Amino acid sequence: MHTNNFDIIVVGGGIAGSLAAVSAARNRASVLLIEEEGYLGGSMTASGTGPMMTFHAGETQVIRGLCDELIQRLVAKGLSVGHIPDSTGYTYTVTPFDSEGMKRELDLMVQQAGVTVLFHTSVASVSVENGLLASVTCLSCGTLFTVSARYFIDATGDADLIAMAGVPFEQGRATDGRDQPMTTNFKLVDVDLQVIRELMASKVELFPLLSKKPGLEKTASRLSFSGFEDIMRQGCNTGELSFDRDIVLCFETNASNEVIVNMTRINGKNPVDPFSLSEAEIEGRRQVWELYAFMKKNLPGFSQARMISTGPRIGIRSSRRLKGLYRMSIEDMFAQRIFEDAISANGYPLDIHSPDGAATDSRFFPYGAFYTIPLRCLLNDTIPNIIAAGRNISSEFEAHSSLRLSPSCGAIGHAAGTAVALALQSGKDVRYLDIVALHEKLLQEGAFLG
């Protein structure tokens, strides 16, 4: 007989939620993990996002702990080549993985930790009592049922639980509330990447980011590339491409000559409006088929390419963000701040896909620079037993563009689970947690705090 009462309920089984659940359960909390798909992994398994980028800041590995444990488990089974140089030249490393393998490994991690998992389940309503979230009513298989906990971790990405409970949030950029464009990724097999490698060696100018680091592709066992701007410009001019996209961006997966294409751009849709989100799914698939035909016809090495999957759901870069006890800023990031209550670190650049069109606004930190994220970005005073984890934490729109990447979200999730478990053990409100004790525990668990 399953209980309906837990210490912690985690809503959302992406990388942040899965690792939050594992870390909390390993710290002796009873944990329920609620996920609307039939598998864990979030955008990396449900949106075809990959590779993970980046675990590093220069030579320093700043994402460690549970997130790196997941990768090392995949490496041991031949399901990831681990952390390799980013041959696009954009950031330090990328981490390709087998998405089916990741689904299974996350299953194993949550099972071994003793997490109870509910798949095919959505939160339909919430019950707030005496200023705290007491329970959530869920919908699954045509059945409504209620589960309760002492703490709730919102790892939905979209801050769904935060919004439903009436906790203040913001969305989009400050000027007009618009979010970064959504993207439907797709996978192609039978791509001749040797052709691309040879072009990187003979015509590096075709790959603008790589041209500053020639030869880098020789060090990467799986190829990432960003280039062919002239071909894209011609496609837009002739009308073969009907949407703004300025560059070809592909990432080889763990399997040789299989690539993830990250190029569709669905602008002007609201990722947390049901009708708008559904329109975006249809538009994303339309763009995928347009790109697929264009790439087969025009791109070197792609004439025999065959599409094996889209999505299966659209990728969302940005949506709602908690208004927390502290709001992460780009000034914090460029100052390389090490917060007293730091819970994770990150060295990925600012990467804002414009809500207006083709351009991407990238701002790079000095080589090897990293910043930390404070626990306060996960916390709020309105309903303090709801904790944010992942890309929905408290931050400026611009700052969010750096911390939203999957390794960063994994590290945030790990810390969130540990923090809440320690709060329960100590009997303290998580807002007043002993930070020294939290740091000691996170360091024991392999985390990097700066």
Image (spheres, rainbow, N blue to C red):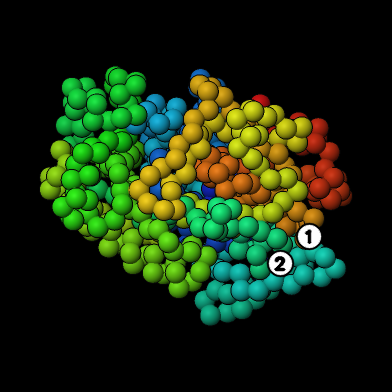
Residue at 71%, 39% in the rendered image: 374
Compared with residue 57, is residue 288 higher up or lower down, i.e. above or below?
Answer: below
Mark 2 and mark 1 lie on one chain; the one further toward the N terminus is 2
**Residue 254 coordinates in the image, percent (x, y):** 34, 38
**Residue 299 coordinates in the image, percent (x, y):** 17, 42
The quarter holding residue 132 reads bottom right
Are circles 2 and 1 on residues that touch, CB within 8 Å?
Answer: yes
**Is residue 166 or residue 397 the one in the foreground?**
397
Quadrant where the C terminus sits is top right
Residue at 60%, 63% in the rendered image: 160
Kind of residue at badge 1:
Thr
Q: Secondary structure at mark 2?
A: loop
| Mark identifier at residue 382 | 1
**Is residue 53 or residue 21 the one in the foreground?**
53
Labels in figure, total: 2
**Is residue 27 or residue 399 the one in the foreground?**
399
Assess disc 1: are there few (<14), some (14-19) or many (≥20) residues with their C-alpha within 10 Å of its C-alpha: some
Compared with residue 223, is residue 267 higher up or lower down, i.e. above or below?
Answer: below
Distance from label 2 to label 1 (Cα)?
A: 8 Å
Query: Looking at the image, can residue 423 be seen?
Result: yes
Q: Secondary structure at mark 1?
A: loop
Residue at 43%, 48% in the rendered image: 354
Compared with residue 203, is residue 403 higher up or lower down, i.e. above or below?
Answer: below
**Residue 130 coordinates in the image, percent (x, y):** 85, 68
**Is residue 348 or residue 102 the one in the foreground?**
348
Kind of residue at badge 2:
Gly
Assess disc 2: are there few (<14), some (14-19) or many (≥20) residues with their C-alpha within 10 Å of its C-alpha: few
Q: Residue furthest front?
A: 175
Residue at 43%, 61% in the rendered image: 268
**Residue placed under numbered mark 2 in the picture:** 166
